[in-house]
Image (tube, grey):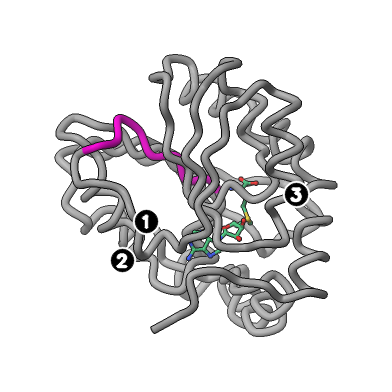
Amino acid sequence: MAEETHNRPLRGRFHAWFLRSTQELMNRLHDERKRSFFASLPSSVVELGPGTGANFAYYPRGTQVIAIEPNERMWPDLRARAQEFGIELELRGLRGENIDLASGSAEIVVCTLVLCSVDEPKRVVDEALRILRPGGRFVFIEHVAAPVGSVLRAVQNGMARPWSWLFEGCCPNRETVSVLNSAGFSSIEVERFEVRSLFMHVSPHAAGMAIK
Ligand SMILES: C[S@@+](CC[C@H](N)C(=O)[O-])C[C@H]1O[C@@H](n2cnc3c(N)ncnc32)[C@H](O)[C@@H]1O
C-alpha cells in the first residue's frame, strides 16, 4: 500500500516553490471560472490536493477547508496562505485515494490541477463521490490529454517521464475527462479550453462541475 504522505525533500521543496511562484498567474488564467465555481460556497469545503492554497483567495473569509494534502512540503505555505485569507484550515496528511471522511458528509469537493498528479485517478474520483452528499458538487479544473494522434499529444507523451519525475507524478497526457465521465455522477458539465503558457504540453484544460 502506498504511503499516506509524500516527503521528497528536494523535489517537494522545488514543487512547493514552483506552485507558490505561479499560483497568482494560474489564478489569473482561471479567474473567471474560479469566480463562478466558488461564488456560492457552503461554510465547509473539502479540497483535494490544495498545494500551496491557490484557491483560498476565492473563498469567503471564515470558510472551513478540509485539505487532503499528502505532500508535507506544501504544508507551511498552505498554513500561511490560510492565515492570510482567513481560512479555517483542517489539514489532513492523506491521499485522495483514501479519505477519512464519512460517506455523504461533504457538500462540495474542490479539485484543481490534482487528478493529473494522483497515483490512481479513478480511486480519487470514487472517494470524492463517496464523501459527497446526494446532490453535492464536485468542482474541477484540470489539464488533460490532447487528442490521440495530435502533435501536442506526441509532445505530452515524450515529456511524460521527465515531467512526472520533476513534478512528483504529474502526467501531461492523462485522460481525466474519461475518468470523470464514467465515474457515476448524476450529471456532469465539462468545458474544454486551451491555456497559453510557457508549458504548452500542459494544455488543453477541462473544467466543470459534476453533481452526485
Ligand atoms: C499541481 S498541484 C495543484 C495544487 C493546487 N490544487 C492548485 O490548483 O494550485 C497538485 C497537488 O496535488 C497533490 N497530490 C498529489 N498526489 C495526491 C493524492 N494522491 N491525493 C491528493 N493530493 C495529491 C500534490 O501534493 C499537489 O499539492
Reply above or below: 123 against 82.
below
Q: Are marks 2 and 3 in contact (CB under 8 Å)?
A: no
Q: Is residue 165 left or right of residue 184?
A: right
**Quadrant occupied by the N terminus:** bottom left
Q: Residue at x 57, y 22 (%)?
A: 59
Amino acid type of the residue that numbered disc 1 sits on in the rendered structure: Val
**Residue beneath label 3, please?**
76
Residue 22 horizontal side relative to residue 1, left or right: right
Residue displayed at 15% across by 34% down: 134
Residue at x 61% of width, y 68% of height: 152
Q: Give the main secondary structure, helix, strand or loop, of the magenta stretch.
A: strand
Please check the rendered image and state whether residue 164 is part of the magenta-colored stretch, yes or no.
no
Mark toward the start of the polypeptide (2 vs 1):
2
168 relative to 107, above or below: below
- x%, y% of residue 57? 67, 25
Residue 41 coordinates in the image, percent (x, y):
43, 19
Q: Which circle's residue, 1 or 3, is located before the other in the chain?
A: 3
**Which residues lie in the magenta part?**
105-112
Q: Position of residue 193 (x, y in %)?
A: 54, 43
Where does label 2 land, which residue?
Answer: 123
The quarter holding residue 55 reads top right
Q: Is label 1 in contact with label 3 (beta carbons under 8 Å)?
A: no
- Amino acid carrying label 2: it is Arg
